[in-house]
Amino acid sequence: MSELCDVCKDPNYPTRSNSVSCNKCKKFYHHRCAGIDKKKIEIIKGIPGLLWFCPTCVSAVNDTSNIEIKILVDAINDMERIVEELRSEVNALKGRDPGGVESIIEEISERKKREKNIIKYRLEEGAGISDRDRVNRIIDTITPNGNAENVSLFRIGRNKTVTRPLRVTYRMCLC
């Protein structure tokens, strides 16, 4: 039984010598029905591994390819939009606090230096009782077992006409 051309269905037309077979759907086409001259049929059959597809299969492949391409283009556009949003966020964060990390580190360092300090204001100088005795009384009031020996005292400023603040520094953190 000979195969019939998918276009003309003519059983008397010699199919093998003047026809091609679609490599996808396996249907036969006469060279005239497929719109291919005899010379091209010989070339198609003469080159091993050369594939020929009928117009229906080419259209289906193109439709599928177009759909896949559209899906990929949409995905690429979404990714580009997301990247642009992330760039905007990064730029906004950069512009919000220039040198922010450095200033935070500097602030933490300053706080660390001062964590053992207490500043006492309006404690009159030379009023008969020494600064050390006054601080010892304050420490005993705050912590009954407080050790005033671990404290250093320093008056801040130079002006003798105004009472200078007293900086009390603990050698160990009271935390």
Image (cartoon, grey):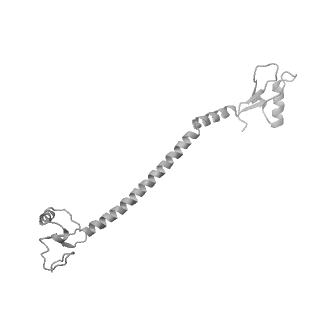
The one nearer the camera, 90 or 154, is 90
Q: Is residue 132 something one can see in this rendering?
A: yes
> Residue 63 vs residue 45: left or right?
right
Q: Quadrant of residue 161?
A: top right
The one nearer the camera, 88 or 97, is 88
| Residue 122 position (above or below residue 47) | above
Pinpoint residue 84: horizontal percent, then vertical percent. 48, 48
Which residue sits furthest right?
Answer: 128
Which residue sits at x=39%, y=58%?
72
Q: Quadrant of residue 145?
A: top right
Q: Is residue 30 something one can see in this rendering?
A: no
Q: Quadrant of residue 60?
A: bottom left
| Residue 20 position (above or below residue 149) | below
> Residue 105 vs residue 33: left or right?
right
Pinpoint residue 8: horizontal percent, then vertical percent. 19, 76
> Residue 71 vs residue 130: left or right?
left
The one nearer the camera, 163 or 19, is 19
The one nearer the camera, 150 or 163, is 163
Which residue sits at x=27%, y=68%?
57
Image quarter hosting the N terminus: bottom left
Which residue sits at x=81%, y=33%?
139
Pinpoint residue 3: horizontal percent, then vertical percent. 17, 77
Image quarter hosting the C terminus: top right
Pinpoint residue 109: horizontal percent, then vertical percent. 63, 33
